[in-house]
Image (tube, helix red, strand yellow):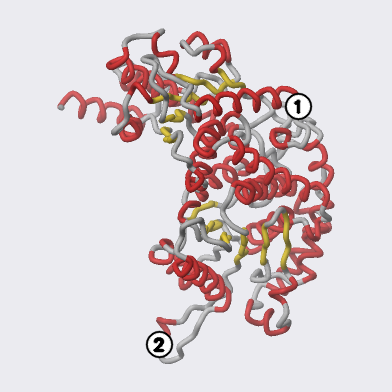
Amino acid sequence: MTSLTDTASWRQLREHHERLATVHLGDLFAAEPGRGRRLVAGAAGIYADYSKHRVTDETLRLLFALARERGVERWRDRMFAGEPVNTSENRPAWHVALRAATPPPEVVATLAQMRSLVDRAHRWALRGANGRPLRTVINLGIGGSDLGPRMATRALRTLDAGRIRARFVANVDPADLDAALEGLDPETTCFIITSKTFKTVETLDNARRARAWLARTLGDPPDLAAHFIAVTANRDAARAWGIAADRVFPMWDWVGGRYSVWSAVGLPLALAVGMAAFDEFLDGARAMDEHFQTAPLESNLPAILALLGVWYGDFFGAQTHAVLPYAEDLRELPAYLQQLEMESNGKRVGRDGAPVDCATAPVVWGAAGTNGQHAFHQLLHQGTLLVPSDFIVPAQPATGTDPDAHRSLLANALAQSAALAFGGDDPAAPHRRCPGNQPSTTLVLPRLDPHSLGALLALYEHKVFVQGVVWGINSFDQWGVELGKAMANGLAPALGGREADGADSSTRALIARIRAAGEAD
């Protein structure tokens, strides 16, 4: 395949950028007063205003040409067909099958298994070792086995019918589990061990500590089997650990962890909000899938967002992207998207094994509005960095929310996006000048409900996919993560007293310092 920077579209974009780089957003709006009504798109109930971007019709034409030249539509069709688009591991990335209108038989069976468990739990028929109903579930996972269900459960917390409370533990630091266990009754607490391999060190360490906590009240295994569920591809290891066969839910090699919230990895969410809401969550993602599959690139929302990211990262040199949900219940979304984007596209080698010749994934960060306005928005308004942003705004308040408070929240979101774009000047006080020209997209959800949340997450999944295709990288492996795991496994014995064979001088000195501090205590 032709190198990205050698393509005709890339060369034309580079020349176009030289002409547009100094044009201010204020000038673009002045030249076209109706710009804010024209540069918009919609999909699966989500309305996107991308008029506050430093682009013209020519920019967009060239970006769409680049996407076609890089084969975005062809790779999209391969992904939906279940072909092995994860090239380094020679397997599909078929997460879209988890929410398809006609899913594969194994997905149908797993959804039925989830439905049965959730129904029993909500009827108080799911009982612990002493016969009492299980009322709290704690998900033990990390990375994709934690971030998705954690974020979605928080986002949809108002749907909690008071049946099952869900908590989440990821960090191997015992303080994380200790905090989650605070105030809980072992007799009514259940743990979900979520690990594709059932070998994840952090997760299994937490599972052992959880079992010890239960045993102090309820006795030793196998009496504790009623308090554990597993979500894993390694069913034999889960059963050997002591989990009943009917409590083991499958994972598959063709679903990456950061794309797995639609599977049994989403069981904590389903237990918290019910299977009807979980079905709506899948429906929203499916609606976005159908849009991504069928809409021309010029009106294809995931493609538009992806190409705008390419424009800023590769031509303006932007190295960061802010995610600003104006909904407190979406406060976990930036962390979820950090993994989705940076683990997927934080790559420096292309599918062909050659180094890339462009920038790839930006650093993704953010926080819920309006909190961020009183923290980092100062840098956005008057700092020296170009920071494209996404404002995410539910138009309608959650049930029971004060309408006046919600209008205030919306007013802040709209004001911030306008101020970032157009700035403000005070000739008598230069230190008060805000130059503007900071680009942003505003995504308006009808409300924060399961359908809208599903559509929003699928939107970002497909955005990441399109960018990976344009950059020529594999968005579905994570070899850097694997390296860190392997090194940690090798160093753990050294911290316990063994020699740190092969370690560098800095690491050896740090091990000695840590061991000395521990011995001093």
Q: Helix, strand, or loop for circle 1?
A: loop
Q: Is residue 519 left or right of residue 74?
A: left
x 78%, y 31%: residue: 82
Q: Is residue 337 above or below residue 16?
A: above
Question: If you read the primary sequence from the N terminus, does the residue marked by circle 1 or circle 2 appear first?
Answer: 1
Measuring from the top left, give residue 9's x and y in whole percent.
81, 59
> Label 1 amino acid?
Pro
Which residue is tagged 1? 104
Along the line of sight, the residue nearer the viewer: 145 or 128? 128
Q: Is residue 64 above or below residue 449?
A: below
Q: Helix, strand, or loop for circle 2?
A: loop
Q: CA distance from mark 1 to mark 2?
A: 64 Å
The quarter in which the C terminus is drawn is top left
Q: Residues within 10 Å of mark 2 (few under 14, many from 20)?
A: few
x 77%, y 49%: residue: 292
Measuring from the top left, give residue 449's x and y in whole percent.
58, 50
Along the line of sight, the residue nearer the viewer: 136 or 390? 136
Occupied quadrant, residue 137? top left
